[in-house]
Image: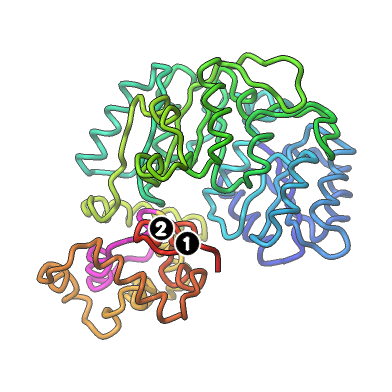
Amino acid sequence: MKQILIADDDLSMRQALAESLESCGFEVETAENGADALLKFEKGKFEVVVTDMRMPKMTGMDVLRGIKKIAPQTPVILITAYGTVKTAVEAMKEGAAEFIMKPFSLDDLEFAVRNVLVTSKGSEEGKIEESYPTVTEIITQDPAIIAILKLLKNVAQSKSTVLIYGESGTGKELFARYVYRHGNRKNMPFVAVNCAAIPHNLLESEMFGYEKGAFTGAMQKKPGKFELAHGGTLLLDEISEMDIQLQAKLLRVIQEAEVDRLGGKAPVPVDVRIIATTNAELKQRIEEKTFREDLYYRLNVIPVKIPPLRERSNDISPLIEHFLNKYSHINERPRPALTRESLALMQSYPWPGNVRELENVLERAVLVCNSDLITPEHLCLEDAMGTARTMPAGNISQAVAGGDKTLRDMEKTLIFDTLNKVQGNRTKASKILGISVRTMRNKLHEYGCDVTDD
């Protein structure tokens, strides 16, 4: 069993992280501060260290430096808030294996841990992804999704690039991993790069690696994600967010099958199967001169579009069952059931955040429900639905079916009404709607609105 060390001065956060990873099959030990973490690390045998960035006296950066002095090959994952990106960049340059931006889900945490285990040279078992339980599974009974899975299974054995389109929260990464698990590279590394989460000035070194002394802070040679994925699969998540200058370098790597490390003297050959995902319309980005047309045609060999949850309503019931079972098990609670009104509310709701939003709603409902029934109040969808606070849940479907508005119109109205209630604060509006700030930004961009940060 893989041993994980967690360092966080916040007791509730420390316990939540530990319980989450333990539920995924890891053995976890916690430390209440940086000094305690280093002391426990010296005495134990940990394969991954997860540390918060902001802690009193000894920060996550100090923990990182201390771990690297004791065991340079041990992966360290930093948890950071949006306001500490510059510090995270510095930490990655000093050898941090990964950083997770707050807020994050259990799947984000689990995938980050499994990802560093897979790519860590110090873990031979980690090179075989299938030695671990499946992180998540695709729950569906929708004919369109079933057809997509059949297509992906048919092309999985090839080396052809797959480009997966879909709104945020539709599970594009799950479909990418489905291709990987059914391909002939399933016993080789699966490496993911989130092009939207990693700052532009760091993404190049993360992708292509660097030599010692290539820039200030480059204390040792570090292979990039392409090299770590050699022989396996590289997922370029949210490829549309990559800087256009870096796109040119990516195109060359794909064409030449070799990477140039920063500060390197000779190219390094790589054999990688690429899967890319995007929630943007790339042809529109090409017209806006923010995405290269030649890169688009290199990536768009096997295009797959994942329909949003509002277009596959017959998946809502099996997803509800799956997430109720999952979070009841994780939190060691009796599995509750939905009342008829709750089920009607969930089936009529437009789900702007797609499956991710549905999962978050049910996770919250399991935690706040104090009986064996989940009522509409436990779902916290009333504020998001606007009229649902005064409209009986049983009449919601009639209002949707009888109106002239499309679901997209309702979604747009819902988002703007919520923004108006919070004086345009997208962070607060996103929290009310149960979607990520990035999803909110993408929706506003889709509506042609200004998308500068709050």
Give the label on residue 445, or none: 2
Residue 71 versus residue 354: which sits nearer the camera?
Answer: 354
**Residue drawn 76% across the image and 17% down it:** 265
**Residue 155's x, y, as percent?**
34, 21
Segment colored magenta: 335-355
Q: Is residue 100 above or below residue 209?
A: below
Query: Residue visible at 38% across and 27% down?
Result: 297
Q: Is residue 229 magenta?
A: no
| Relative to 254, 433 lies left or right | left
Observer-nearest of 251 and 289 = 289
Quarter that holds the N terminus: top right
Please state which amino acid type lies under the numbered disc 2: His
Residue 364 visible in image: yes
Is residue 324 something one can see in this rendering?
no
Q: Earlier in the sequence, mark 1 or mark 2?
A: 2
Point out residue 206 in the picture as x, y percentages from the top left corner.
66, 35
Figure quadrant of the C terminus: bottom right
Along the viewing direction, whichever of 326 and 189 lies nearer the viewer: 189
Q: In this view, does 123 lie above or below 107?
A: above
Which residue is label 1 attached to? 451
- Name the residue rendered at 72%, 14% in the picture: 266
Q: Is mark 1 on a helix, strand or loop?
A: loop
Q: Residue furthest left?
A: 402
Q: Identify which amino acid the numbered label 1 is placed on.
A: Val
Rounded to the nearest angstrom, the CA distance separating label 1 from label 2 is 6 Å
